[in-house]
Amino acid sequence: MSFAEYEKVKEAKEKERRHEALETLRAIRERQLERNRDLTEEEADALADRFSHELIDDLAKEGKIRVERDERQRVDKRESSL
């Protein structure tokens, strides 16, 4: 298999992976919409806000993203130890 063919196969697999992930997210969204039909708009906003904060915190703990808030805490700790 040539490198160009390998790249095409790799790209096709990635496209399929993304498609499957999108379908999974759509299915989750539909289930959540059904489960949360009884929430007020304010309750839904609060729930979404909480979820997004928890997701960001989890990604930061795993080292997958860096959060400005955490960077400031690191700088403060370094400055206080000097």
Image (tube, rainbow, N blue to C red):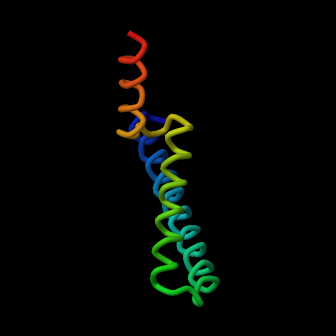
Please give the name of the residue rendered at 36% of the width and 24% of the height, measured from the top-left corner: 75
Residue 82, compared with residue 48, is above or below; it is above
Residue 6, compared with residue 27, is above or below; it is above
Q: Farthest residue toward the bottom?
A: 38
Please give the name of the residue rendered at 43% of the width and 49% of the height, measured from the top-left corner: 11
Residue 23 at what x, y percent from top left? 54, 70
* Left or right side of 28 for 8: left
Residue 45, compared with residue 63, is above or below; it is below
Rendered-image quadrant of the C terminus: top left
Residue 70 at what x, y percent from top left? 42, 35
Please give the name of the residue rendered at 52% of the width and 79% of the height, measured from the top-left corner: 43
User: Of 12 and 54, which appears nearest the observer?
Assistant: 54
Residue 50 at what x, y percent from top left? 52, 62
Please give the name of the residue rendered at 42% of the width and 41% of the height, measured from the top-left corner: 7
Residue 54 position by quadrant: bottom right
User: Of 28 and 23, which appears nearest the observer?
Assistant: 28
The number of discs equals 0
User: Of 1 and 46, which appears nearest the observer?
Assistant: 46
Residue 21 at what x, y percent from top left? 54, 61
User: Of 29 and 44, which appears nearest the observer?
Assistant: 44
Q: Farthest residue toward the top?
A: 82
